[in-house]
Image (cartoon, rainbow, N blue to C red):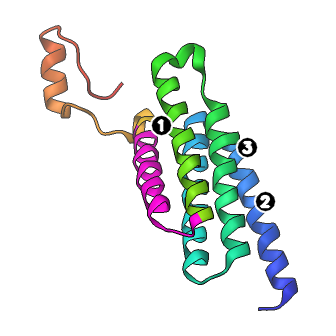
Amino acid sequence: MSLGAKKALAAYGKQNLQSQVESASPGRLIVMLYEGAIKSIQLGRMHMQNGEIAEKGQAISKAISIIDEGLRLALDHEQGGELAANLDALYFYMMQQLLEANLRNTTEPLDQVLVLLNDLKEAWESISQPAAAQPPLLSEPAAEANQDRGTLSYGKA
């Protein structure tokens, strides 16, 4: 692939990402931050295994920046209370693990952080889906039967 084609693809990727960010809900933005951190850690792991020290450092540093300047700054400590404090501590732990992995050139801390980020990403994906995309808790007939009895239904809104 020519240098010009690579630059064109990179520009397209940046425009596409910018478009996604501009149209994303707050929940989707958090998921995108998780995806970016995960991708950077996976890239850092690959560079580590290939002995590409400078590239490894750049990828891990990018993951740390996403966690620190994206995920940690997005926390609302006033409304989030204990949950926000716990996430803040978890994000700090992740950053420490990433620094250790980078300094010691070891993949175990990267793998730990990947598991944590994937779990959090999945949780955010499940709560940030639009209501129409989530399956009803009761089937249509069951929801209708509950409405006939005057009870609360959890079916379609």
Describe residue 93's horizontal placement relative to residue 134 as left or right. right
Q: Looking at the image, which residue is at 50% across and 61% down?
A: 110
Q: Amino acid at mark 1?
A: Ser
Amino acid type indicated by mark 2 = Gln
Question: Could you tell me how far apart the alpha carbons at marks 1 and 3 are, in whole angstroms?
Answer: 16 Å
Between residues 70 and 153, which one lies in front from this camera angle?
A: 70
User: What residue did someone put label 3 on?
Assistant: 22
Residue at the spot of label 2: 15
Residue at 42% x, 35% y: name it. 127
Name the foreground residue: 151 vs 10: 10
Residue 118, image x, y percentages: 43, 52
> What's the mark number on residue 104?
none
Q: Earlier in the sequence, mark 2 or mark 1?
A: 2
**Residue at the spot of label 1:** 128
Crowding near the residue tagged with mark 2, few <14, some 14–19, many ≥20 C-alpha atoms within 10 Å: few
Q: Earlier in the sequence, mark 1 or mark 3?
A: 3
Which residues are the magenta region?
A: 104-126
